[in-house]
Image: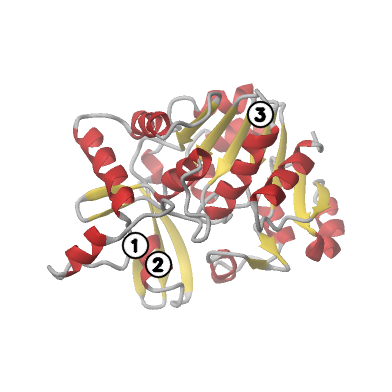
Amino acid sequence: MITALGGGVGAAKFLEGLSEVIGGEGLSVVVNTGDDIILHGLRISPDVDTIIYRLSGMIDANKGWGVRGDTFDCLSALSRFGSQTWFNIGDIDFATHLYRTQLRQEGFTPSQVTSELARAFGLKEGITVLPMTDEDVETWIVTDEGEMHFQEYFVKRKMKPDVIKVVFRNIERAVPAPGVIEAIKLARVIILCPSNPIISIGPILNVKGIGEALRATGAKIIAISPLIGGVPLKGPADKLMRGLGLEVSSAGVARLYRDFLDVMVIDTEDAREAEIISDMGIKPVVLDTLMSDHSRAAKLASAVLSEI
């Protein structure tokens, strides 16, 4: 079995490619839920939904999120009442959030809800999507303009305030969701997807027990840098790393994972960092990591698996 950790558009793209090249082997995906937010009275889990939409073939590939062909009539109608509509939710997407909220009100846990959504969207047999925890955790960004939910910082404020600190609210109560530790223990290889190391991988690693499980596993652990030439293709990884005083580079990402990482995949543009990564005791692998289409994502996934 292969186990992957991640969240966001980059992770979803990679996982789509990975699902095409693993044959009948099982794939468990541990997904960040720190991006979760409540809007319009609805529970929204962007990373979980993006990965399920992508693996089901329903993703809007042009945007990298949401459902292909979705309309935004409900959001437009909400604006009539003065509701905040800065977070773009399509009509089909609204149905997902309505169903999630209904199940949560009925007593379902986030992992049970995720399982129901994966079934409803027809994910391929053998693919399991697991939220990192069943506790409600939220990522908040402390900026020079005050503290705000990550989604407000990222979507509404367009990453403009300077970052001072990142806080995972309620993380001290979080324990791994059912199946997460087992997925790590039973894996023959563990892949950290090309995801933001601070707000996509970071919350997962901060759930008590997950870091310990990664350090104890006998599986090879491979990470893929989300940076190309020191810049993320999407999202605020560079701004967050810089705001926290971290080196904004693939080597800087490797340094965050060095206590459990075996292999670090970096883009050809960052080949000069290979020696730095090797000096950490981590094997550097230089590949073309740009996933501009499905075939390139599958090619990258095949190349990553060849390092096992």
Could you tell me if the residues under marks 2 and 1 are in contact, i.e. CB atoms within 8 Å?
yes
Visible in this render: residue 163? yes
Q: Nearer the viewer, mark 3 or mark 2?
A: 2
Q: Which residue is mark 3?
A: 216
Horizontal and vertical percent for residue 62? 52, 60
**Residue corresponding to mark 2:** 155
Residue 78 lies in quadrant: bottom left
| Amino acid bearing label 1 | Asn
Q: How far separated are the C-alphas under marks 1 and 3?
A: 41 Å
Specify which label sits upstream in the sequence, 3 or 2: 2
Q: Earlier in the sequence, mark 2 or mark 1?
A: 1
Front position among marks 2 and 1: 1
Determine whether, in the image, residue 25 is placed left or right of residue 277: left
Q: Amino acid at mark 3?
A: Ala
Name the one closer to the observer, 301 or 141.
301
CA distance separating discs 3 and 2: 37 Å
Q: How many marks?
A: 3
Query: Is residue 253 placed above or below 153 in the rendered structure?
Result: above
Q: Specify whether 160 is left or right of 287.
A: left
- Residue 99 sits above or below residue 159 on the image: above
| Image quadrant assignment for residue 226 | bottom right
- Kind of residue indicated by mark 2: Val
Residue drawn at (66%, 34%), measured in percent from left and top?
215
Query: Where residue 189 appears, x then y in whole percent?
Result: 70, 31
Query: Is residue 160 left or right of 13 when viewed as pictured?
Result: left
Residue 188, horizontal then vertical, whole percent:
70, 26
| Residue 88, numbered label | 1
Q: CA distance from mark 2 to mark 1?
A: 9 Å
The image shows residue 228, relative to residue 6, as above or below, that is: below
Which residue lies at the image location 76% right of the left edge and 40% below the top edge? Answer: 302
Q: Quadrant of the N terminus?
A: top right
Query: SS at mark 2?
Result: helix
